[in-house]
Amino acid sequence: MKRLNVLFISLALLFVFTFMANPASAFEFNFYYQEIEEVYDPASTAPWLGLGQTVSNWFGNEKVEIKKSEYVPTDSSPDKGHAQIAYKIRTRKVTCLAELYNAMGVTQEQINKGEVSNGQLALIDTFKEAQSKAIQDRTEHAFKNKCDVYLTDSSDYDTNPNVSDYVKNALKKDFWPCSSGDKKRIQMSSRFFCGDADTDHAVSTFVHEYSHSLDKTEYQEKNHYGLDNTHYYDEIISKSAAFKESWAEYNEMIEFDSTRDSYLSRATANTMLSIESTSKSGDYSNKIKASDATAEQLMCNEMFMCSMLYKLHELLGEDANGKDIVSNAFYETNGKNNSMSNLIKQIIKDNPSKIADIIKVVDDATLNKMKSDYMREFFGDSQELENYITNNNVDARGSETTGSVGENAARRAKPSSENDTQATDTLKKTSIFKRIADKIKSTLKITSSSSSKLPTLKKLSDETENNKGKGVVIEVESDDPFGE
Ligand SMILES: [Zn+2]
């Protein structure tokens, strides 16, 4: 009996020590390198595929798939009406930097000499960032024990002058950085970062996406990003989407000074905010000056909201254990119905002596547009709030409700074909993307890469007046596993 007790205690201690010695073992990143090897005309290869559908096959430890593009140009885009394309994608798992270099076909020497594309450097930096303190500190809040990260490399196409703008736009949208709905998959891509010499953009985006994966909040509105399912930092989107984005952006802001400065400098009274049309996707001609927006509208803008969280962070700092007080409150309230109001109420609850300062930060961050009734609903009733309302003459701001957000919500509640799991993510280079979209010509250029790495494709016809706008015409040679 005694021996059994000793055995039991020993096993129990072993278990405890093992667990304590390696608490991080509960979470792991799995990295997958994905090469976009070819761009196809799905009509000639896999005409049965639906948007976003794939057909795949394994070759040893590599998966090769044909995926039909999901890119649906907005009503306002010159790409509208273009024939769909499909990709041949080769995927393999990479467990260390050497394996990633090998899969990419690059060497450290090439990297040192600057012979690797910006897009590929961004993927390499993303891989390294997973080991950073910024990411590792956050893994303790993960509620899934793993996260798959797809590093999609389309660098043969990203900046190739022979590749059409349509294909470049499709690549950008199809492999947009995002954290998918199941919280277990992050997408990063060379296409998104191909124009960035500054790789901080990639690593801060990775922190952004990882922070999304820690967020349990569910979108509470239909068309939460508007008809185009894309959001811009200057856009008035749905309240829950703005809350989710602001959380991810706030995480970037506390890790990256350049991101912090960028948002703080933009969230001002003179900034123009845009409201997407509810009848024509991608139409942002409706602009409103931030100083003319209501507090409710500003609460629906990610840039204003992340700046507000950051200002609360500046006010409250970190607790005695070095924990970020804003993030702590977020994790305390983390749940599918979480909201900015919930979070702020929790911050007040955790820091009762600072309530007046917290109210002021939120009120200032929304340009002193909050009405007294909205304040009571947002912060919860308290004597401190009543004092603030009196001392700041909040009732003089008028008592009429604007109805703007209600109208937006009603308009956004229209049925949509949007697929929530495919939610596109933050558009850092908003103005650049808009400019690209504006610049796109409807003329069709050659879409297959001229790279020598693509020997299995034969382009059947060059751009002519006859095939303009008719899509890519490409033949797949018979030795291709997916060819007919
Ligand atoms: Zn995001």
Image (cartoon, rainbow, N blue to C red):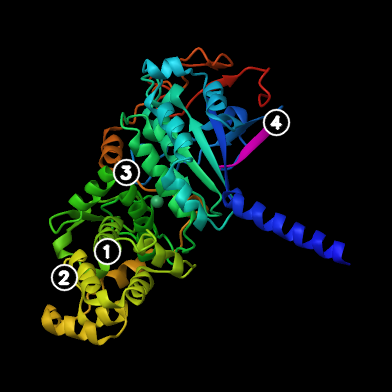
The tag earlier along the polypeptide, 4 or 2, is 4
Judging from the image, what secondary structure is the residue with disc 2 in?
loop
Residue at 47%, 15% (x, y): give it.
451
Judging from the image, what secondary structure is the residue with disc 4 in?
strand
Say left or right for 168 vs 20. Answer: left
Q: Residue 261 carries which label?
A: none
The answer to the question of whether label 1 and label 2 lie on touching residues, with beta carbons closer than 8 A, is no
Which residues fall within the magenta stretch?
A: 51-57
Residue 420 magenta: no
Mark 3, residue position: 428
The crowding category of the residue bearing disc 3, from other C-alpha atoms within 10 Å (few below 14, some 14 to 19, many at least 20), is some
Any atom of ligand 1 within 8 Å of the CB at mark 1?
no
Say left or right for 162 vs 272. Answer: right
Which picture quadrant has residue 340?
bottom left
Say left or right for 302 vs 109. Answer: left
The tag earlier along the polypeptide, 3 or 2, is 2
Mark 2, residue position: 368
Q: How far apart are marks 3 and 4 (CA)?
A: 35 Å
Query: Looking at the image, is 346 positioned above or below residue 476?
Result: below
Residue at 32%, 31% (x, y): give it.
196
Mark 4, residue position: 58
Q: Distance between the residues labelled 4 and 2?
A: 58 Å
Judging from the image, what secondary structure is the residue with disc 1 in?
helix
